[in-house]
Image: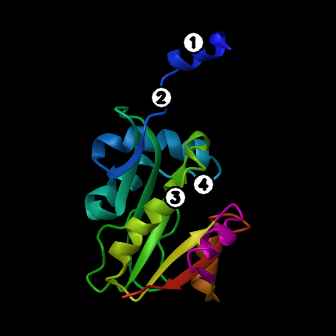
Amino acid sequence: MEEVANIEAKSPAKAKAAWREMSLNDIESLVRVAENIHADLPESDQVFAERVKLFPEGCLALTEGDSDKLSGYVISHPIRRRQPPALNSLLGEIASNADQYYIHDLAILREARGRGLAQECIGKLFEIAKRYLTTSLVSVYNTALFWGRFGFVSRGVDEGLEKKLLDYGEDATYLERKNEE
């Protein structure tokens, strides 16, 4: 029994994870997470850096303790309704007539999952999203049920959106939710 107590006393306490606004200095670590989670859906570091520059309040980094390495991230920004960007494409700018909030990517490393961090992040995004009537995303890896817990439902797509979805994989599904005021 004493040996167990000694081992526990020597083990470092689990560092508290927290979401913070992302900076351009986080891009290298973000790409490491993206390559781990989305190996089949690669995007260039220029795409991520552009999103951070264009809409920093919608780009959050998940860190643990004093570490600069990310355990997760989210990229989100306004778009024109039902016009999500193609995978691995630059926006150039946020459209002045953007009328929908878009969650481009939420990724959390496996070792940081199961602690309510995704829910916490989505809550932060919904505060921003209140400025728009709806929020949308492209669900990948059969995550539509996960997103359904937050009010997202599948919507029919036109031919243009259907073509964009093909780049996101066979299981890609366009989802929307009505935002609360």
Q: What's the CA distance linking mark 3 and mark 1?
A: 34 Å
Q: Is residue 145 magenta?
A: yes
Give whichever of discs 3 and 4 has the lower sequence position: 4
Give whichever of discs 2 and 4 has the lower sequence position: 2
Q: What's the CA distance linking mark 2 and mark 4?
A: 34 Å
Q: Mark 3 = which residue?
A: 118
Q: What's the CA distance linking mark 1 and mark 2?
A: 14 Å
Q: Position of residue 117 (x, y in %)?
A: 50, 54
Q: Mark 2 = which residue?
A: 13
Callout 2: SS: loop
Closer to the camera in the image, 166 or 105: 105
Nearest to the eye among marks 3 and 2: give it.
2
Closer to the camera in the image, 38 or 87: 38
Mark 1 touches mark 2? (CB < 8 Å): no
Give whichever of discs 3 and 1 has the lower sequence position: 1
The numbered disc on residue 41 is 4
The amino acid beneath tag 2 is Ala
Nearest to the eye among marks 3 and 1: give it.
1
Residue 46 seen in this snapshot: no
Residue found 62% across the figure and 83% down from its top: 153
Q: Position of residue 43 (x, y in %)?
A: 50, 52
The numbered disc on residue 6 is 1
21 vs 84, left or right, is left
